[in-house]
Amino acid sequence: MDQLVNKYAAKLISAGLSDDTGHFRPIVGGLDDTLVWNRKARETQVLEKVFQGLAINSLVFLRPKPPLDQIINFLASRALETNGLIQPKDCETRTFLHDLPVVDKFCPNKIIQALKKRKSVIIAPAVNDPDFPGPAVIAHGNVSPEQGFVSVSSVVFACFVKFFTDYLEFLQSGMASRNYHDLFDELAPELVSQPLDPPLLMKGPFSTEEQVYAAIVQAGRKTIEYGLVDSYFGNISFCQDNILYISQTGSSLDELEGCIDPVPLDGSSSAGLTASSELSAHLKTISQTQCQAILHGHPRFSVILSMDCDPQKKFFCKYQDQCHIRCPEKRFINQVPIVPGEVGTGPTGLCNTLPRAFKNSDSVIVYGHGLFTIGKNDFSGAFANLLDVENKCRDFYFNKVRQLRKQIEEKPNE
Amino acid sequence: MYGWTGKILHVDLTRERFEVETPDLDFYRQTIGGKGMGGFYLRQCAGLAWDHPDMVVCLFTGPMVATIAPTSGRAHLVSKSPLTNLVGDSSVGGKLATQVKRAGWDGIVITGKSSSPTGIEIHDSQVKLCRADHLWGLDTQKVHEHLAPGKAGLACIGPSAENEVRFASITIDQHHSAGRTGLGLSFGVKNLKYLLVSGKGRTRVKDPKGLKQAREEIMRLTAASPALMGQYGFSSLGTGAVYDLMDNRRMMPTDNFRSTWFEHAASLNAKAYSKTYSPDRYGCKGCHILCKKISTKDNKRVAMPEFETMSHFTALIGCRDRDLVVEANNLCNRLGMDTISAASTLACKREITKKNYTRQTLLSLLNDMAMNQGEGKLLKKGSLAYARAMGQPEAAMAVKAMELPAYDPRGAYGMALGYALSTRGGCHLRAYPISHEIFRKPVATDRFSFSGKARIIKIAEDLNAVIDSLTACKFIFFAAGLEEYAKAYTAVTGLETSAQDLISIGESIYYNERIINYINGINSKDDDLPQRFFKEPGSSGNQIQIPPIDRKSFLKARAKYYDIRGLDSKGKPLKKKAEELGLPWTSL
């Protein structure tokens, strides 16, 4: 347990979600017969009571570092004015978290009540509390601190995506309030950063299985380093000699050693039982394109823009509540198609929409979910595309906001 | 009352009487259904022998049965196990549970002993006992053909249960089994050949819209699960899909657990069966996963072996003949015998006698067990009784006298702990640690470490006690969680709850089983594994080392478990803990 609590505390910092100084330092607790923490902290008094009130074996306490804390506080304070829930529409939330409960006090009972029903809770004190600087996100696990780690990072990702998605929608519908403008203006300068150059990755074609494994591990790690996924998750595969080597379900892209399943294309083995949920989509994509490499991440602005839809058009759309599975429009961002589809298989699964969308593009965005890219015989092209599409989406987003703001400012007061 | 019907049927076979019990809502809240309710009635006769006429045999449904909640068409059977003389229970699929519920019953409690072979027939509120002399001696398939249940649900026993095979099963709706712990013999000792149920009622749902929403959430998670709905998952290949994984992870029990890798495994996997037999997808009522695979041969429906059967009838006994596995599986099903215990007992015999099986000797011995003839007279008592009689008790790969399933514990230490501590003996399903140790759900844990496993096992046992009380399928919990099922429960019953509230009830249900077992003499000496696992390594390879389990670490983890579970250092339940959980206390 000691090792696990320290590992996931460190990962929260390296993921850029928190800091290793002051009150931003994450707190992770693990319980077998005794309770261990990654560090001493005043908050553990309350968290120990949370442990006592729930059948769990781990807790993660995160104070997201700026500007993430501002975003969460902003959404949380609005949630507290209504039903106490933040309801993002991205894929991760829809599938795994459902909604994000918010409470206004860092007290055991409120936290326990929320965590009895959900994987996470956001603490957002209504007024500034010198004893408890907020906001904070708490999540639990019954198997490993990794569960809490995944949940808190997904919460932060979902809130980030929600704020920028909502803002764009509100701008287009003329409903953006002063508060939204102010927070956006505060956040924007830090986000319009200089794009990074893609990394140097192993060059294909590869001649041995070892090279394939090494190339996958390297590309996975770089995807994390470049911040192109949330919670370290995404998936990655490479096809060589009629075997698809694919990351296992729930594997962390920066720790793929020993977490890659070789899946024979002829279906002669079911060892792919533990492969990524997107195995079917990868297999179909491989068979329908000439590519060997597939990379999937959750870059934030690709996800945000994938959900951008003209509010007026949406108002009249009969699928307005099912955009993620039934969007009837052929949509593109800079020639990159956006397709609907849910995680995994099933009639509305992205395995039915993604592969054919690669016909005319090496990159495809899945609505509210993330970006898939392909490469011919190594990951260089796929990675470059992943990065390039995200950079373009970010530019596209800020340009669109700028134009909309300009229109609003030029509009005579009524 | 929503969800439940509010009625429990009591059948006294000795007096040929029926009574209807209408418990209050508190009873339902505290026991939920299925395993929880069965445990309540078993506790009342916990000190009786498994074959005492007053011993109960319970069949309980859950509140979500016969609703649109996914995988809710199951029931739970509970009695004292003829194999272990401890808690004996089994989750069962098919359509029986749905019919029981639609007939207006939450469950049936059977006591007494009929003077001659009998069947219980229930059609809505009409209950009658029927002579079954003409069915006695028939195998389960023939019983099914005779009774032609149509839409009704049918549970019946075969010759094994009539001939006191300690691991006799109950066959449900022809293709499903209450396989483990010998509950078939619990029917047999009461002269109960079959139970036939049909009904036309509907389960009342408090909040249909909320249930629909919960269902959608569960279905979405299922679709995202490679183990369930992926192209190599259970839906596509059946539970046999696990076979390759166990081979790959070097934890396939081979030669009676003397090694953990079977060199012929690649040609005996689920894909090979699929290619040879082209089976259809088939499943329990109310389930969309359809993990059962059934083939049609010569106009007859032939069930494909489940994973455990595939593994134990090949690697464990040194068999390479796929057709023979299918034949042995069907023979066991017809005779009404648990395939895990049957194969494991044969593996034990093979180790002791050092004689390999031929097609003929294998099938013949299975038949001898069921018919109580030849060597079968001893083998039908299970591997532990057989090995003791042969002077080599260490060759029985069993915990608390129940044979181990097809996951070698040297390849998954949570499984090692789960096996040892399970209240029904060598069972993988009480804590189901394979979920995180192999399937990586909800996240992966280190399968070669005991770190954290004591609490993980305890929480999982409580959780699975809830699942068996809701009578949902454990497989769907590779994808969904109690978070989603609590929402469905609330929508159906109208009772506010949460995942954690349900787990608290699960803790009480499981502790009750520990008390029942303690009343029957179980303590820490029984919460253990066969010594082989601590002394002999498995088959390392494929860059995976399979050393023996470190006994000290195992005992340390077990001691932690006792502490976390609220037992004393010998595994004895404590009065204070029982009272805290609202359980009646018996001086132990």
Image: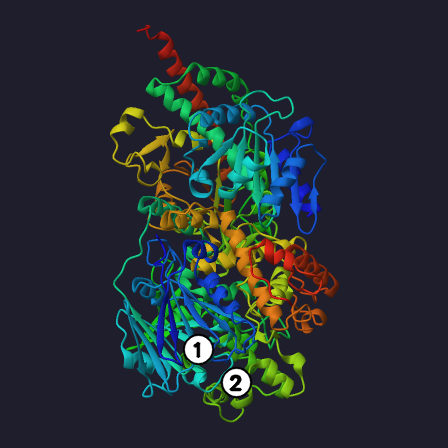
In the rendered structure, find residue B450 and report the number of the disc placed on it.
none
Q: Chain of mark 1?
A: B
Q: Secondary structure at mark 2?
A: loop
Identify the amino acid type marked 2: Lys
Q: Nearer the viewer, residue B571 or A315?
A: B571
| Farthest bottom residue in view | B374
Identify the amino acid type marked 1: Asn
Residue A129 location (% of width, % of height): 61, 22
Label 1 environment density (alpha carbons within 10 Å; few <14, some 14–19, many ≥20): many
Can you tell which of label 2 and label 1 is closer to the viewer? 2
Q: Chain of mark 2?
A: B
Question: Considering only vertical position in the picture, is B179 above or below A293?
Answer: below
Question: Considering only vertical position in the picture, is B205 above or below A370?
Answer: below
In the rendered structure, find residue B329 and report the number of the disc placed on it.
1
| Farthest right residue in view | B552
Is residue B542 left or right of B56 when viewed as pictured?
right
Lower position in the chain sequence, tag 2 or tag 1: 1
The answer to whether one can see residue A253 in this image is no
